[in-house]
């Protein structure tokens, strides 16, 4: 089992400096919805996902590639960006639509968190959908681990904290040691409080309420499904793939 004092949790992309990630393995978490969408896209046959910082970077890349093989995807404040092929609903990313394509992916918080992790040793993409696979990969990890919750515009997001807590809870077999870091203790404690009722707690989070107004409940229910995707997306050379 990985030593718990080497696991930290950052609760938003604004709560750390890039150089704090050097030589660490970063697990990026954006349950609603960016990392759930990335995991789904790769499960359904996307060739790769290029995370971008903003609309400028997305349009620069899309202008330099063959449009038959690439799709421009993402959202701003939960809504598909005008002119993009797809938004950020994982349910849109079916094999028929994205099979064999490389996705240029631009989201409000999730892809920014990934981009901010570029100086780390490795970057893994986590969601409830691939929870078990992420845990397996971390069990033998020799680097220090940072669970990076994308949050929402610099604020904590409870659904991300719950997934960070679930990862820690599994890695330590339900027993946190006394020397665990503060971030790990907080995520672990919140997960322990709600662990028997994760989907209903997530449906009541701030971001779920925003999404419910915009698109209903389907995406939220889907993103709470545990272990439906047995894969570990990893970022290498600017592209996330499996
Ligand atoms: O912030 C993000 O990266 C998105 O996942 C937010 S949303 O769920 O598309 O609103």
Image: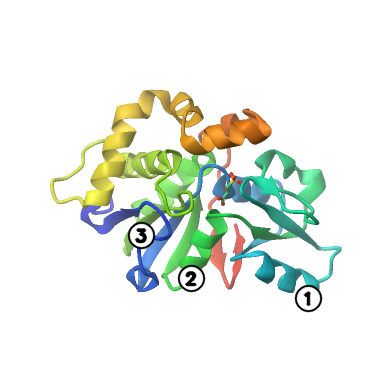
Side of 216 relative to 32 (left or right) = right
* 1 and 2 marks in contact (CB < 8 Å): no
Q: CA distance from mark 2 to mark 3?
A: 16 Å
Q: Position of residue 172 (x, y in %)?
A: 26, 43
Residue extending farthest to the left is: 178
**For mark 2, what is the residue?**
118
Mark 1 vs mark 3, foreground winner is 3
200 or 225: nearer the viewer: 200
**For mark 1, what is the residue?**
64
| Tag 2 secondary structure | loop
**For mark 3, what is the residue?**
15
Side of 242 relative to 185 (left or right) = right
Residue extending farthest to the right is: 68
Q: CA distance from mark 1 to mark 2?
A: 22 Å
Residue at the location (74% across, 69% down)? 59
Quick check: 73 above or below 219?
below
Residue 141 visible within the image? no
Q: Position of residue 151 (x, y in %)?
A: 45, 49
Q: CA distance from mark 1 to mark 3?
A: 34 Å
Residue at the location (78% across, 76% down)? 64
78 or 185: nearer the viewer: 78
| Tag 3 secondary structure | loop
- Near mark 1 (Cα within 10 A), the count class, few <14, some 14-19 or many ≥20, is few
Residue at the location (84% across, 70% down)? 66
In what quadrant of the picture does the C terminus appear? bottom right
Residue 84 visible within the image? yes
Quick check: 20 above or below 151?
below
Q: Position of residue 35 (x, y in %)?
A: 55, 49
Quick check: 122 above or below 229?
below
């Amino acid at each position: 089992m990985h030593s718990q004092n080497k696991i930290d949790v950052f609760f938003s992309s604004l709560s750390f400096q890039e150089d704090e990630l050097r030589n660490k393995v970063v697990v990026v978490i954006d349950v609603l919805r960016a990392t759930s969408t990335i995991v789904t896209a790769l499960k359904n046959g996307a060739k790769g996902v290029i995370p971008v910082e903003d609309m400028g970077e997305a349009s620069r890349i899309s202008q330099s590639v063959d449009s038959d093989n690439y799709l421009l995807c993402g959202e701003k404040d939960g809504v598909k960006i005008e002119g993009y092929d797809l938004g950020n609903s994982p349910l849109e990313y079916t094999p028929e639509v994205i099979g064999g394509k490389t996705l240029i992916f631009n989201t409000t918080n999730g892809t920014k968190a990934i981009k901010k992790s570029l100086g780390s040793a490795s970057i893994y993409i986590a969601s409830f959908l691939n929870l078990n696979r992420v845990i397996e990969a971390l069990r033998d990890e020799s680097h220090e681990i940072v669970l990076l919750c994308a949050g929402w515009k610099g604020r904590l997001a409870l659904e991300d904290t719950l997934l960070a807590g679930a990862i820690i809870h599994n890695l330590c077999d339900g027993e946190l040691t006394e020397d665990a870091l503060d971030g790990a203790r907080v995520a672990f404690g919140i997960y322990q409080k709600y662990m028997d009722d994760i989907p209903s707690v997530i449906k009541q989070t701030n971001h779920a309420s925003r999404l419910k107004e915009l698109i209903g409940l389907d995406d939220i229910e889907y993103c709470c499904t545990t272990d439906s995707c047995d894969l570990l997306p990893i970022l290498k050379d600017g592209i996330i793939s499996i």
